[in-house]
Amino acid sequence: MRILLLEDDTDLAEILALGLRNAAYAVDAVRTYAEAEELLRTTDYDVACIDLGLPDRDGFGLVRRLAEDPSLRRPRRLLVLTARDAVADRVAGLDAGADDYVVKPFDFEELLARLRALGRRGDEHGRVLRVGELRIDLAAHRAWRADAELDLTPREFSLLRYFMHHPGAVLSAEDLLEHVWDANADPFTSSVRVILSRLRRKLGDPPPIATIPSVGYRLQEGP
C-alpha cells in the first residue's frame, strides 16, 4: 500500500513515516498543499493522510478538490489527521469526502488499525487474502503457504500482499516500484529483483510467482 502523508510538523512527519515504513507501507511525506498537489497529479496512492492546518492552504480544500478536480488522482481512501477536535470539524471533514478522521494526539497503533480498516473497505477479501495455497492475514501481518507459516520481512510481506491483490495479472517492475516502494526508491536499482528473489525462495516450490519474459511477473492462481 502506498501512502501520501501530508503533515507540516517535520518531527511528527518523520516519526510517522518511519513507523509506517517499518509496518511495510510505502510512504511519500510532504509538508505543504502545493507539494501534495504536485504528487497527486502524477502518482496513484492507496491512502492519503491529510493534515488540515498547512502553512500555505487549508487541508479541507484539498479534500474537497480530490472529489471534484479530474487533474488530481484521487487516492482510494482519504484519512484526515488533525488537531481540530470539534464535532463541527469532524462532520465537515467527512462531508467533504474524507473516509476517516483522526484527532491528534493519537496512538500509532490506532492509526495502523485505521489504515488496515481503510485498506479492507470495499475489498471482498476482507482481512484474509487467499490465492491457491497462499494465505495472508492483513491485520496480523502473517502469511502461510499451505499450513507452513512464512518468515517474511515487512517489504517481502508488502510485495506478496500486492501480488495477492492482483492474482493472475502480469505486473511489471515499474508497477511494483510504484505501489510497494515509495519516492525514495531508485528505479534503476535492482531492489525489485533482489526482494522478489528472496520472496520466491521463501515461498518454495513449485514457484507461485512466474516470470513473464520482457514483461514482468504473475502470481499463479492455482496451487
Image (cartoon, helix red, strand yellow):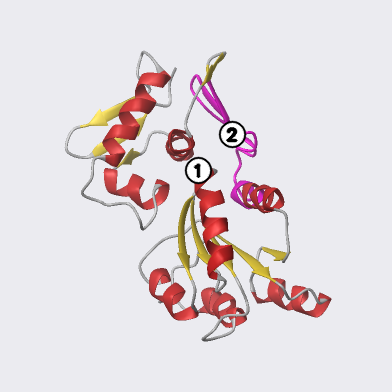
Tell me the number on the disc at residue 141: 2
Cβ atoms under marks 2 and 1 closer than 8 Å: yes
Residue 148 within the magenta-colored segment of the rendering: no
User: Image check: 86 left or right of 198?
Assistant: right
Under mark 1, the amino acid is: Ala
Residue 113, given in percent of the width and then of the height, sits at 68, 47
Q: Quadrant of the C terminus?
A: top left
SS assignment at label 2: loop
Residue 95, given in percent of the width and then of the height, sits at 70, 75
How many circles with numbers are drawn on the protein?
A: 2
Per the image, the residue denoted by label 1 is 24
Under mark 2, the amino acid is: His
Dot 1 alpha-carbon crowd within 10 angstroms: few under 14, some 14 to 19, many 20 or more: many
Q: Residue furthest left?
A: 214
Closest to the observer, 161 or 187: 187
Mark 2 and mark 1: Cα distance apart in space:
9 Å
N-term-proximal mark, 2 vs 1: 1
Closest to the observer, 190 or 163: 190
Q: Is residue 19 above or below residue 98?
A: above
SS assignment at label 1: loop
For the record, the magenta segment spans 117-144
User: Image check: 39 left or right of 11?
Assistant: left
User: Image check: 27 left or right of 136?
Assistant: left
Closest to the observer, 143 or 98: 143
Residue 191, given in percent of the width and then of the height, sits at 29, 40
Closest to the observer, 222 or 176: 176
Residue at coordinates 45% horizontally, 40% vertically from top-left? 162
Residue at coordinates 17% horizontally, 38% vertically from top-left? 214
Dot 2 alpha-carbon crowd within 10 angstroms: few under 14, some 14 to 19, many 20 or more: some
